[in-house]
Image: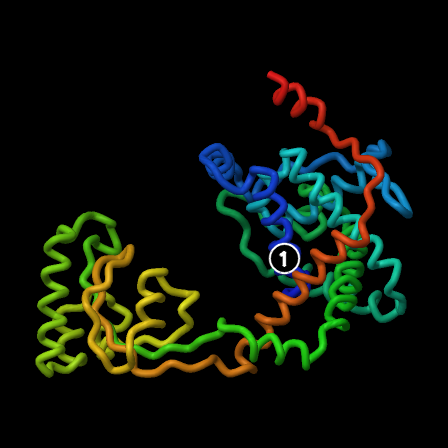
């Protein structure tokens, strides 16, 4: 149920995450508790009729109802952000993002092309909603009713989808293949490492209860290390000792990129000489004994989209910084926050 272009949605999510973090909403127990109390399936939409001007920028104004509609749609597609949007500082960052999208939409023409794309996206969206099962204890609702409960009309969603495609194309058209390849070639990221390992865990992966003490786990890992150094095969040792269910029956072999692994495990995988048995390596999961078989770089075609998403995110942020000139901002909650700070 995601008619937003994936790449742009990624960039928007990343920017919003940065905005919320900067505003102090991205961490801390209070935000966590609030998020746990929010029921994503029961959105509480903001009113969209207010004509009050909440922001002025070089080229136009943002009215409260327009901003609330934008927030309603964003919360509809990404319900996890809804509890965070009460923070005025976070809203200021979102206003800049909204203004940036407005400015970009004005630059992109060919409405006929985007009308067709929006109609198709809306149709696909409605089909997905129709096929989705009803929530437990509730009757199945038609798409317009679902949207209405989230403070959105069908034609408003269509406009959002149309503009979303324009913004996405605006950035995608600026990304050149040669720049992506250049980024790939100079970057130390996108590594691919193949290794064998044996995990001696300290906790049960299912219950998180203590399985063995740290001292016991380390002693067992040292025993594994000694057996491997004495010539035992990873196939037998991993099957007998490893607590990693995903690799123990395959000689403890795993392949992947270090940025996906526990930091201590990743550092060892990058630094250990090839075909050498490691000392026990402590991670959040316990102790590992590893042997790195091969290091290389993930093929360009496999990471091209990842590099492109990062590039688009950078361009999106730069556009906001360079092109969005906010002259005035008067958001609901500003005064309350000022009074709170003064206390």
Asked whether 38 or 290 is in front, the reply is: 290
The image quadrant of residue 71 is top right
* Residue at the spot 60% in from the left edge and 16% down from the top edge: 343
Instruction: Residue 310: tell me if it is visible.
Output: yes
The residue lying toward the viewer, choosing from 62 and 57, is: 57
Secondary structure beneath label 1: helix
Q: Residue at x 79, y 59 (%)?
A: 163
Q: Is residue 290 above or below residue 233?
A: above
Q: Position of residue 155 (x, y in %)?
A: 81, 52
Please state the horizontal and vertical placement of residue 119, each as a whole percent of the image. 79, 64
Q: Is residue 273 left or right of residue 234?
A: right
Residue 311 in the image, given as x and y percentages of width and height: 65, 67
Q: Nearer the viewer, residue 340 or 162?
A: 340
Residue 269 as seen in the image, left or right of residue 108? left
Reading the image, the residue beneath label 1 is 129
- Residue 306 falls in which quadrant of the image? bottom right
Residue 5 is situated, as x and y percent measured from the top left of the image, at 68, 64
Residue that appears at 51% across and 39% down: 35
The N terminus: image quadrant:
bottom right
């Amino acid at each position: 149920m995601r008619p937003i272009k994936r790449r742009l949605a990624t960039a928007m999510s990343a920017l919003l995450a940065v905005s919320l973090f900067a505003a102090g909403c991205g961490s801390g127990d209070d935000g966590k508790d609030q998020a746990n109390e929010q029921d994503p399936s029961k959105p509480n939409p903001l009113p969209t009729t207010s004509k009050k001007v909440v922001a002025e920028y070089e080229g136009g104004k943002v009215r409260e109802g327009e901003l609330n509609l934008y927030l309603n749609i964003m919360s509809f597609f990404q319900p996890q952000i809804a509890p965070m949007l009460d923070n005025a500082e976070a809203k200021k960052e979102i206003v800049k993002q909204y203004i940036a999208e407005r400015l970009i939409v004005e630059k992109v023409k060919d409405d006929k092309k985007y009308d067709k794309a929006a109609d198709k996206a809306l149709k696909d969206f409605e089909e997905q909603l129709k096929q989705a099962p009803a929530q437990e204890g509730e009757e199945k609702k038609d798409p317009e009713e679902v949207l209405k409960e989230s403070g959105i009309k069908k034609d408003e969603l269509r406009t959002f989808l149309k503009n979303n495609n324009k913004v996405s194309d605006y950035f995608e058209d600026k990304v050149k293949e040669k720049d992506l390849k250049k980024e790939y070639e100079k970057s130390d990221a996108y590594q691919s490492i193949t290794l064998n390992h044996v995990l001696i865990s300290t906790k049960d992966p299912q219950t998180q209860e203590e399985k063995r003490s740290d001292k016991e786990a380390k002693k067992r890992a040292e025993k594994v290390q000694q057996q491997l150094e004495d010539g035992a095969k990873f196939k037998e040792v991993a099957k007998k000792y490893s607590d990693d269910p995903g690799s123990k029956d395959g000689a403890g072999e795993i392949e992947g990129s270090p940025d996906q692994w526990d930091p201590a495990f990743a550092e060892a995988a990058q630094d250990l000489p090839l075909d050498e048995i490691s000392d026990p390596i402590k991670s959040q999961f316990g102790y590992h004994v590893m042997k790195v078989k091969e290091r290389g770089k993930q093929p360009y075609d496999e990471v091209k989209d990842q590099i492109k998403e990062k590039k688009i995110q950078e361009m999106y942020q730069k556009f906001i910084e360079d092109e969005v000139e906010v002259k005035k901002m008067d958001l609901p909650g500003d005064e309350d926050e000022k009074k709170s700070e003064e206390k």
